[in-house]
Amino acid sequence: MNLDLNITPLKQWLPSFERPLLIAGPCSAENEQQMLHTAADIVSHFPNAIFRAGIWKPRTRPNTFEGIGDIGLEWMQKVKTETGLVTATEVATAEHVEKCLKAGIDILWIGARTTVNPFSVQDIADVLKGVDIPVFVKNPIYPDVQLWAGALERINNAGITKIAAIHRGFHSYDNGPFRNSPKWELAIDLKSTCPDLPIICDPSHIGGSPELIPYIAQKAMDMDMDGLMIETHMDPANALSDAKQQVTPMQLKKIIQDLQIRCASIESLELKSKLDELRSLIRKLDDDLLELLAKRMAVSEQIGNYKRENNITILQLNHWKALFERSSETAKLLGLPHDFIKGLYQLIHDESIRRQTDIMNNK
């Protein structure tokens, strides 16, 4: 995948930028007091934060709280006037964009439910032409990095260069302990295609609970992401939306204070030399691993030929189960995680089946 974006660095339009860029505020704007109280607490700890609040809330089911609507923009204006915080909100339609521009909202973001629809993203991009405003794009709900990249391209093609991606996790059939599976590899994939693209992590939507937010936030920093979007509410238990995943301003303070911010660059020649030595060893081991995989696939093809000649089915379920159980036991002795081995062996098994199927079909 090639992703060539024209990006203005964060430091050029956010002079106070330091990792992590912090975006904090309630999931939804609920009332004026809630907004001003929460913002005042946030600014007392983080004067350079960006204040976020949802004005329009896309919901899965009707008859649930779908946002306070336009009046929330007036409360955002008061937050900006009284605290000096930069403000940000989600837009899902061209009309939302127009209202936010008129109200003086500083930053817009496109939500996961909108990113999945190129028509909606293009409508937003069209109304942004000729406008100089930062726009962040959340990953789509489902794990499709092409959709994510496409949405970023559409916004960038409209002339928006103050642009960033927000990693908020993906819906999966197996999310593990998370509300949305992080699938860090997809964020890495996006970053690798466009190294200048800022990526902000949303631990609130990934975790779905305050207990997981510190872990996810630290992981994001260790992955060299640029910032964090953390839903913060003065009274999370009584929030009208996403009550289970919001934190108080004091909890936010502790989360950020406890972060270890590591440097991505290596200035020490001694450290660089040692790292290069270890990376060289990794490259050799990777080469050995690939050679072993190639040999294994060659044996799988021999088995495929034998099955074809003797009219035996490709899938031998009992054999596969026994093989995996044996490998899992060995992996455990070697200190390798079960989920890692399970995923690896599934990929190897799928490729073996594919090759044997081709042999059966005389390809």
Image: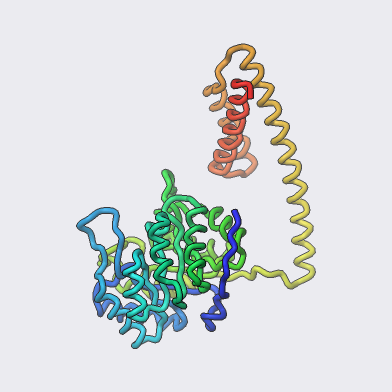
- State whether residue 188 is above or below residue 16: above
The x, y position of residue 277, in whole percent, is 79, 57
Task: Identify which residue is drawn at 73% across, 32% down.
Answer: 295
Question: Where on the picture, by quarter, is residue 250?
Answer: bottom left
The x, y position of residue 280, in whole percent, is 78, 54
Q: Is residue 258 left or right of residue 288?
A: left
Task: Identify which residue is drawn at 55% across, 74% down.
Answer: 19
Which residue is farthest left? 63
Q: Is residue 63 left or right of residue 73?
A: left
Task: Identify which residue is drawn at 58% across, 12% down.
Answer: 311
Residue 214 visible: no
Question: Where on the picture, by quarter, is residue 71?
Answer: bottom left
- Count of residue discs: 0
The x, y position of residue 135, in whole percent, is 45, 70
The x, y position of residue 82, in whole percent, is 34, 88
Which residue is farthest top? 310
- State whether residue 35 is above or below residue 214: below
Question: Where on the picture, by quarter, is residue 362?
Answer: top right
Q: Is residue 117 left or right of residue 270?
A: left
User: Residue 185 or 42: which is nearer the viewer?
Assistant: 185
User: Residue 78 or 233: which is nearer the viewer?
Assistant: 78
